[in-house]
Image (tube, helix red, strand yellow):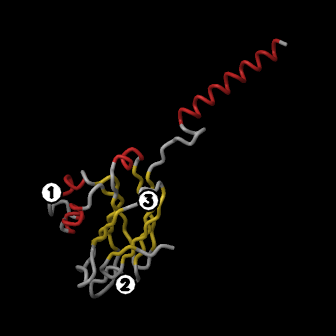
Amino acid sequence: MRQGNLFRALSATALAAFLTTAVGCGWLFNKQEKPLRVEVVFTGADSLNFDGRSVQACQVKAFVLKDVQRFTAADVRAFFNPEFDPGFLEAFSRDTLATVTMIVAPGETRTATIEVPHALAKREPRLYFGSIANFAQPPSERGKERMSFKMQKKSRQTLRVQLNKNTIAQGKKK
């Protein structure tokens, strides 16, 4: 009889410890806050970064931003050459919640994940996605080297970025 009581006491203690841990960590009631996870799919066209003689890989950066004004107003060289405008990157970092840098080759598709902690994402009234590419030639008349738009605050999302000859655009949803 004493072994049965001891077994019940140990079982009750173990169950209480598990429930305390599960509730405290959010496992039991799924209260654990999930980070904002953005999967970015970069697709380089076969003519990517054509400089008049050859195609070449292109460096591209993607950001989750609190504000896009500094992103849209800055010279493209400031993003890729810290010596161009020494104070820019420090000032821009105040607008930036997360970033990723990638090298994309012609005809290649690469994926990167940007993660923003839940507390940071929740604190901001709006979030923006911005991406900029370092092309060998400036964009053509209607092309552009950067794109930005207001993001949804879903915990998981996939965004597509299309890199063409010397322009960047939002890719088509699949």
Residue topped by disc 1: 86
- Helix, strand or loop at label 3? It is strand
Local packing at callout 2 (Cα closer than 10 Å; few below 14, some 14-19, many 20+) is: some
Image quarter (top left, top right, bottom left or bottom right) of the N terminus: top right
Picture layout, residue 16 above or below residue 132: above
Q: Residue 66 in the image: x percent, y percent? A: 29, 55
Q: Is residue 67 left or right of residue 11?
A: left
Residue topped by disc 2: 47
Residue topped by disc 3: 38
Label 2 vs label 1: CA separation? Answer: 33 Å
Identify the residue at horizontal 43%, vertical 62% (top origin).
Answer: 112
Question: Disc 1 marks which amino acid?
Answer: Pro
Q: Is residue 6 left or right of residue 30?
A: right
Q: Which mark is residue 114?
A: none
Is mark 3 in CB contact (under 8 Å) with mark 2? no
- Helix, strand or loop at label 2? It is loop
Picture layout, residue 130 above or below residue 6: below
Which residue is at the far right? 1
Local packing at callout 3 (Cα closer than 10 Å; few below 14, some 14-19, many 20+) is: many
Identify the residue at horizontal 81%, vertical 15% (top origin).
Answer: 3
